[in-house]
Image (tube, rainbow, N blue to C red):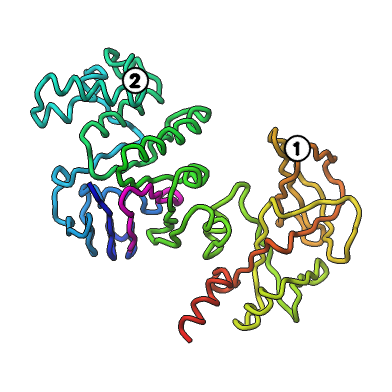
């Protein structure tokens, strides 16, 4: 079955709150598409609209080009898995999984065969006689998935399905879920607020904030080419550092703090846009630390805190001339050792700087593309 999902200009209000604001995007056939954004951003509302559980105030929903906006949920052949799993507490695992088939009056033997198939696929064949209260979070989640898969849906809708599983299992569950989706070839729309989850699972990610779709791209592209400061700060952990500064004749300046020359390409774009007030974005992995000043562009900083994370160390730094309200995080190798309060020098990797317009908070590359398109 080929199924793509298209949302065209979807708006949904609850009273005065605009939950979804003119959202347009497409989930391609067999794609694993993740909607990523902070809590209350409108992700679940969009999912419910695709399922048919909510009706949009404006806009249309298409499955493979057919308008399904007014089609009731039970006729859409979508399967939903929520973070609560919603298993029937009084039924064992076998009966929970087979419910959708019983409702459709499948013969007994066929039900048995199908339950056995999906149970093996999800490695829960040994749990079929158990009751939900006897299962761990991860097992419950697999039962909920089995119940969703058994219906042979055209579309999978998953709302934070891994949030109730402990952290160690979660990483494993992510990989399993992606493998399962690719094997079944079902078009999937997955909702999460966890950027690491989105980055590791998605074919493409749609970033949503305050009901608006901000950027849609492959994970790698969101990381390297964020459209604005929101995306820059939301993708990557620890998040991108932002520093206000001014552009003057090929240099970024912060009076009494630093003066850094920037690459030719960035210069051209900034000058073409005529922007003076910028926000510099630097990822923690693009900051190097040295104990001696080795270049006039090095910036003096003090060590504020150190987080040892096993495979690496995150160093919180205060730029000396800026004081405590400006903490910058730098990722260092795990061998990095240093006492708190020590003064040292930091340098930004010139090839990996981001420049945002202070007024619009947009990436200058985005603004430049918009400008040249207009012209």
> Image point 27% across, 39% down: which residue?
80
Q: Is residue 172 left or right of residue 107?
A: right
Q: Is residue 230 left or right of residue 314?
A: left
- The residue located at (80%, 40%) in the rendering is 336
Which residue corresponds to the image point at 11% horizontal and 20% vertical from the top-left? 108
Q: Between marks 1 and 2, how big is the CA–CA gap?
A: 39 Å
Do the residues bearing badges 1 and 2 touch, measured as CB atoms within 8 Å?
Answer: no
> Which quadrant of the view contains residue 365?
bottom right
Q: Position of residue 139 (x, y in %)?
A: 37, 23
Instruction: Write the residue at 59% across / 72% down.
Output: 357
Residue 154: x and y, percent? 23, 44
Q: Pinpoint residue 52: horizontal percent, then vertical percent.
A: 20, 49
Residue 334: assigned label:
1
Q: Nearer the viewer, residue 256 or 16?
A: 256
In the structure shown, which secondary structural element does the residue marked by tag 1 occupy? loop
In the image, is residue 353 part of the stretch drawn in magenta? no
Number of the label disc, if any, that sits on residue 124: 2
Q: How many C-alpha atoms fall within 10 Å of the one at disc 2: few (<14), some, or many (≥20)? A: some
């Amino acid at each position: 079955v080929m199924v793509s999902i298209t949302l065209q200009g979807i708006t949904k209000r609850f009273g005065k709150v605009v939950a979804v604001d003119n959202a347009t995007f497409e989930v391609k056939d067999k794609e694993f598409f993740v909607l990523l954004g902070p809590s209350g951003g409108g992700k679940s509302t969009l999912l419910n609209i695709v399922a048919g559980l909510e009706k949009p105030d404006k806009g249309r929903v298409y499955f493979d080009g057919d308008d399904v906006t007014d089609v009731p949920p039970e006729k859409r052949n979508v399967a939903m898995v929520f973070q609560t799993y919603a298993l029937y507490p009084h039924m064992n695992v076998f009966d929970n999984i087979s419910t959708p088939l019983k409702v459709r009056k499948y013969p007994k033997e066929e039900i048995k065969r199908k339950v056995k198939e999906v149970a093996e696929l999800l490695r829960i064949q040994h749990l079929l006689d158990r009751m939900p209260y006897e299962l761990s979070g991860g097992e419950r989640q697999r039962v909920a998935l089995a119940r969703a898969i058994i219906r042979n849906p055209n579309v999978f809708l998953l709302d934070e399905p891994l949030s109730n599983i402990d952290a160690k299992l979660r990483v494993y569950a992510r990989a399993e879920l992606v493998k399962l989706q690719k094997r079944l070839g079902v078009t999937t729309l997955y909702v999460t607020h966890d950027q690491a989850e989105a980055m590791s699972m998605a074919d493409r990610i749609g970033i949503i904030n305050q009901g608006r779709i901000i950027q849609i791209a492959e994970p790698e592209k969101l990381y390297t080419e964020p459209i604005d400061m929101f995306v820059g700060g939301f993708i990557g952990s620890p998040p991108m550092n932002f520093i206000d500064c001014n552009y003057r004749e090929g240099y970024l300046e912060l009076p009494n703090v630093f003066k850094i020359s920037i690459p030719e390409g960035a210069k051209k774009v900034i000058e073409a846009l005529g922007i003076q007030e910028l926000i510099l974005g630097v990822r923690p992995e693009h900051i190097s630390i040295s104990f001696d000043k080795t270049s006039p562009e090095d910036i003096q900083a003090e060590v504020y805190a150190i987080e040892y994370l096993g495979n690496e160390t995150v160093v919180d730094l205060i730029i000396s001339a800026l004081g405590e309200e400006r903490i910058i995080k730098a990722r260092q190798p795990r061998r990095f050792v240093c006492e708190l309060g020590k003064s040292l020098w930091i340098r930004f990797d010139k090839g990996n700087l981001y420049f945002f317009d202070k007024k619009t908070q947009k990436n200058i590359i985005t603004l430049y593309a918009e400008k040249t398109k207009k012209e």
